[in-house]
Amino acid sequence: MSGQQHAHNPRWTMVFPVLAAALVLAYFAGLLPHDNALLFAVEGVFLLGAVFSAVHHAEVVGNRVGEPFGSIILAVSVTVIEVGLIVALMLAADDGGPTIARDTVYSAVMLVLTGLIGLSLVLGGHKHYEQTIKVAGTSSYLAVLGTLAVIALILPNFTTSTAGPTYSAAQLTAAALVSIMLYGAFMFVQTVRHRDYFLAAADDEPDAENLDPPTRQQARVSLAFLLLSLAGVVMLAKMLAPALDEMIELAGLPQSFTGVVIAALVLAPESIAAVRASLANRPQTAINLALGSALASIALTIPVITLLGAVDNVQLALGVPPAKVVLLSLALFVSAITLLPGRTTVLQGYVHLGLFIMFIVIAAVP
């Protein structure tokens, strides 16, 4: 059709990964200073560029393979970035950063359930009045996400084998195995057994953008730059870790706010994609992107940090404080009420945004 166009790779999506790689090589070769404010600013710009480039290339590859694989590729790519940032900050911390993973995973889940879903519903609802999503797929997301959120972030507060909000080695191993098992089962359901649960009917999304899938060559180029971007993000995060800690301290924010910063950074491009999908009356794609990123975040991060904690002999603190337990429980409850009927309006969106405001306030002023 003459109105169709192929997805393409803008020049900036290839320039930023190359610049990030060059900066990393120069830094670790000792050609650049390690405590220069201007260098930190440049690193931050390149980090943002590499993050957005990674998500763009993940979208191009995803468009080539189609839904729901596209949403999965994007969610997993974002999670790789998140895990890389967590690992970089944990390795940079003198004590192994026992709470960094918890704070980041909690923030990612809350940002998705409150801010991202809220913004998508408000903007989509204002433009299209009422939007429809498939209950079968959404309930699958919420069931697995709710289970893993409670296991990883709430249950450690009530176990007695170890002191504090921690798991024993056996409990942490079990949590990691359950995470892998549930995520694997979910992927099987989403991509093989019940793939139709996660695909909207063609007439449910009349305003969807009409794009030809990228060519095979474009997808291959994007795959290469996706890998380069992910490597650049992880290494730049390691370089920026000390400066991030200092900025959080200078701003008078609690150290746990680092998790909010990391989660907001890695979710920013995917959030834009979800909001654009909602505005284009593709609510199922928006929900797939939002809940898929939250699910991948918690399901893939827990096994990785479990292994890292065992290698570095770090006792990981996973359970969140009581106020955050209340907010997380409320966010899961409200998400179920909002999404499981299958039809959404702006009212539900504003409820989620109200929770988002409280999440940010409690994170900044515990």
Image (tube, helix red, strand yellow):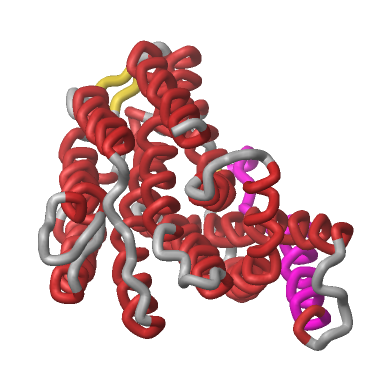
Which picture quadrant has residue 304? bottom left
Q: Could you say which is closer to the camera, residue 224 or residue 158?
A: 158
Q: How many marks?
A: 0
**Quadrant of res 312:** bottom left
Foreground residue, 72 or 255? 255
Which quarter of the rendering shows the C terminus?
Answer: top left
Q: Is residue 9 above or below residue 149?
A: below
Across and down, in percent, residue 289 comes to: 41, 45
Magenta segment boundaries in residue numbering = 1-26
Q: Tell me the residue at 37%/47% (across/down).
A: 106
Q: Residue at x 44, y 52 (%)?
A: 104
Q: Is residue 250 left or right of residue 64?
A: right
Residue 211, how many percent across, how many down? Answer: 56, 45
In this view of the protein, which residue sits in the foreground, 131 or 293?
Answer: 293
Q: Is residue 249 above or below residue 35?
A: above
Question: Is residue 14 on the magenta stretch?
Answer: yes
Q: Residue furthest left?
A: 160
Residue 337, visible in the rendered structure: yes
Q: Is residue 122 magenta?
A: no
Residue 182 in percent (x, y) is at 17, 61
The answer to whether residue 192 shows anywhere in this view is: no
Decide if residue 100 is on the left or right side of residue 324.
right
- The residue drawn where x is 75% and y is 69% is 20
Q: What residue lies at 56% left-to-right and 58% top-to-bottom?
A: 60
Residue 23 figure quarter: bottom right
Image location (x, y in percent) of residue 263: 50, 49
The N terminus sits in image quarter: top right
Q: Quick one: which residue is furthest to the front in this view?
A: 163
